[in-house]
Image (tube, grey):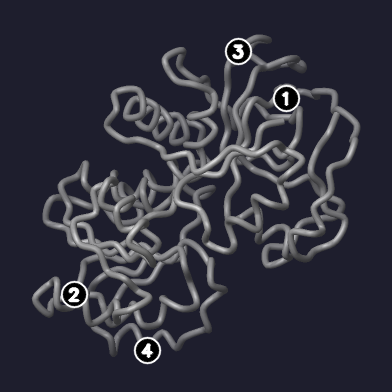
Amino acid sequence: MQAIRITEHGGPEVLTYDAVEKATPGTGEMVVRIDTCGVNYIDTYHRSGLYPVELPAVLGLEAAGIVEEIGPEVTLFKPGDRVAYPNVPGSYAEYCLVPESKAVLVPAELSLELAAASMLQGLTGHALTHSTYAVDEQSQVLIHAAAGGAGQLLAQLCKMKGARVIGTVSTEEKAEIAKAAGVDDIVFYTREDFVDRTRELTDGRGVDVIYDSVGKTTFLPGLDALRPRGTMVLFGNASGAPEPINPALLMQKGSLFLTRPILFHYIADRKELEQRTTDLFRWLIDGDIEITIDRRLPLAEAAQAHQLLESRQTAGKLLLKP
């Protein structure tokens, strides 16, 4: 089978389209023929070595496809089932070996493409808005990179819960995308100070929570955009990892809360995974939320996908098609 591998850490140029051996399922495992796999920032961290992985490695963590073969003691699925999963390494490939404990059944009403596109970003959005900080109708929220795939989903989920949403974007085109996702107030971080503008929009109070996937360039200033006892949710490093801070700074800025969540701690339990995916799939089927597909690329063009993602040339989800 064909897959995208790395044998060393580095830029997009280290991604290679190689023939690799197709695995045989062991106990509790199944082979899934991939229909669509999603591209995420965490894939670029694995590639660059920011989050090191054992080499050589096939990249990718999320996909959807058809169960082709099951191993001993698999009871939840059978060959022919349509499944998706959010946390299985090796998904930039034609086939992937998937533990049944990490897969979910895709409803007939939902396309495999949308199921794949919703896994990491959709479940992350669910966790961040329902568990990390429980947004409600009284909440004022700031979302960085509001026109990106994760940003659009976060905005929609926050609006579902009645919150006021402020979003940062770089261009007029991205502003329109963010508004379509439900963002109430746009801040152009390229031409105005997002802290000053956020303070102005909240009558000097600051927001209750910031969802920051950008990292280095926005994290430290963002502490000044929070209300006293506000919450900074740092969940990405698109501009690089922030510099370390003295915890006393959180006291000085207003007894702030800081968390650095990762999705996998919010779906480690099978019951929790099923609860979140059930919600997510229902919202997609009912039209309560939408996922914007920026573009679909052949699996062999994974390097181009990484270049597009890291240069912020996307406004929505990037998908790879084996």
For image coordinates 40% across by 35% down, the residue present is 276
Give whichever of 229, 59 is nearer the camera: 59
Q: Name the amino acid type tagged 2.
A: Gly
Q: Name the amino acid type tagged 1.
A: Glu
State the image quarter where residue 80 is shown. Answer: top right
Mark 4 or 1 closer to N-term?
1
* Marks 2/1: CA–CA distance: 48 Å
Rendering coords of residue 185 (x, y %):
20, 62
Q: Which residue is mark 2?
A: 206
Tell me the element at label 1.
Answer: strand
Mark 1: few/some/many CA within 10 Å (<14, 14-19, 20+): many
Mark 4: few/some/many CA within 10 Å (<14, 14-19, 20+): few
Mark 3: few/some/many CA within 10 Å (<14, 14-19, 20+): some
Q: Which residue is mark 1?
A: 29
Rendering coords of residue 168 (x, y %):
33, 66
Rendering coords of residue 30 (x, y %):
72, 22
* Nearer mark to the viewer, of 2 and 4: 2
Q: Name the amino acid type tagged 3.
A: Asp
Give whichever of 140, 320 is nearer the camera: 320
